[in-house]
Amino acid sequence: QVHLVESGGGLVQAGDSLRLSCVASGFAFSNYTMGWFRRAPGKEREFVAGIGWSTGMTQYADSGLGRFIVSRDNAKNTVYLQMNSLKIEDTAVYYCGSLVAGMWTRASDYSYWGQGTQVTVSS
């Protein structure tokens, strides 16, 4: 049984930081590219950041460039998203997904998803 469990969300003020975690089980985590997506109320799920399975290559959406850092610890089957200088526009449910092949930025290409963790940024 494949499980992805996100955690680390919460209520913060604009300018604050959060680190999200996603713990995976039930599949060969180290063989998958891992991505972070988010869904704001009334909007579709959008790509935030991704990290490759072997080289650690990363990719970021323009929305998070310079503010977000994605990393992974394969020994712990965990992928992280460090979010700095949070903005009100970052308010969304953040999801962790796993990708075997496809476009990092396309949610439909991902194989597995977690249930998400809520991030709310206020001012």
Image (cartoon, grey):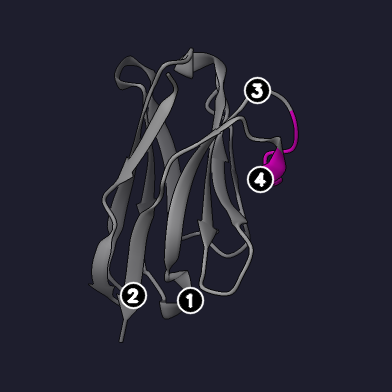
Could you tell me which quadrant the C terminus lies in? bottom left
Reading the image, the residue beneath label 4 is 107
Residues at marks 1 and 4, CA–CA distance in whole angstroms: 20 Å
Q: Residue furthest right?
A: 102
Dominant SS in magenta: loop
Residue lying at 65% horizontally and 23% vertically, measured from the top left:
100
Residues at marks 3 and 1, CA–CA distance in whole angstroms: 30 Å
Nearest to N terminus: mark 3 or mark 1: 1
Q: Secondary structure at mark 4?
A: helix
Nearest to N terminus: mark 3 or mark 2: 3
Contact between marks 3 and 1 (CB within 8 A): the answer is no
Q: Secondary structure at mark 1?
A: helix
- For label 2, the crowd category at 10 Å Cα-Cα, with few meaning under 14, some 14 to 19 and many 20 or more, is many
Q: Residue furthest bottom?
A: 123
Nearest to N terminus: mark 1 or mark 2: 1
Residues at marks 4 and 2, CA–CA distance in whole angstroms: 24 Å
* Figure quadrant of residue 10: bottom left
Q: Nearer the viewer, mark 3 or mark 1?
A: 3
* Figure quadrant of residue 55: top right
Reading the image, the residue beneath label 1 is 89
Residues at marks 1 and 2, CA–CA distance in whole angstroms: 8 Å
Q: Is 58 situated left or right of 117 in this image?
A: right
